[in-house]
Amino acid sequence: MTWLYFDWSTPEQGGRRSNWVRSWTVWKYFKDYFPIHLIKTWDLDPSHNYVFGFHPHGVLVAGAFGNFCTNYSDFEELFPGFTAYLHVLPFWFCCPLFREYLMSSGSVSVSKKSVSHVLSKEEGGNISIIVLGGAEESLDAHPGKFTLFIRQRKGFVKIALTHGASLVPVFSFGENELFKQVNNPEGSWLRIVQEKLQKIMGFALPLFHARGIFQYNFGLMPYRKPIHTVVGRPIPVHQTLHPSPEQIEELHQTYMEELRKLFEAHKRKYGIPEHETLIFK
């Protein structure tokens, strides 16, 4: 507890990553199990900082972890000169010991102070990865669904403007295919309970299931479905220390348009029917 007291702010100050932990052989098996792929569509300038908006949340955000929190992805080869920071709920850094394990992967808090710290690097080369849909979106992570909670998520736009960090939409095809969920349509008693618990605890409790170790009918192991995380084109952002609501709204609309274009341009490659499209909430 004494250590926790003195180390409390570390998750908001860049964390404490460990190449040893990120290089554990288990992460190679984790990546190859699905498998997880990282696809670059545009070159990024390592003298700048970037905000990656990651979609969708899915149940466990496996694509974000596999690509940005281990040394077995193609991240360093595709984006040389960059350091990636996956931002997660501050709640997880309140848990003794587990917080050390989490930080060792390169994860940091998603608080405003933490994101600002990452984007404040003057020489550039930092990438903040934010799963914008958050816990709420995980409740809609059903196979074949593409519902994103983004219309009211504008804090990332404001912080990008404040620091002049370019916005990059990222879509992880296959993320929602890893688990099935108990049916929980909006308005159902289950969804109401889940949403109330999410507001109280800060994280959601989706009732998910998939396969077992030696059988495919039921269990908590994710299905072996390929994940293709596609990094889109950066949206240039001019630094504005005190952005107006109009500036935030304009950039937010541009981001959603670029995200939709990214999805439409790549969906056929990954087996998504032509008629399917993103639903923004």
Image: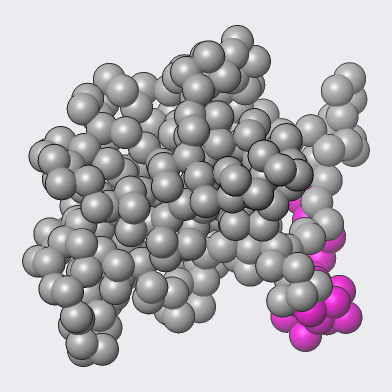
Q: Is residue 202 left or right of residue 86?
A: right
- The answer, for residue 138, to whether it is visible in the render is no
Span colored in magenta: 178-196
- Please identify the residue farthest to the top as the structure is shown: 25
Q: Give the percent coordinates (x, y) of residue 175.
A: 56, 45
How many numbered markers are drawn? 0
223, 197: nearer the viewer:
197
Location of the N terminus (image quadrant): top right
Residue at left offset 30%, top offset 67%: 159
Residue 147 appears anywhere in the view: yes
Instruction: Answer whether residue 181 is magenta in the image.
Output: yes
As rendered, which of 130 and 11 lies closer to the eye? 11
Q: Quadrant of residue 30?
A: top right
Residue placed at 48% from the left, 29% from the top? 17
**Location of residue 212 by image quarter:** top right
* Relative horizontal placement of residue 196, taking residue 72 as reference (left or right): right
Image coordinates for residue 165, horizontal then vertical, percent: 20, 57
102 versus 277 height, above or below: above
Asked if the magenta segment contains residue 61, the reply would be no
Q: Is residue 251 left or right of residue 211?
A: left
Give the residue drawn at x 63%, y 34%: 100
Residue 45 on image: x %, y % = 12, 39
Residue occupying image coordinates x 56% and y 36%: 103
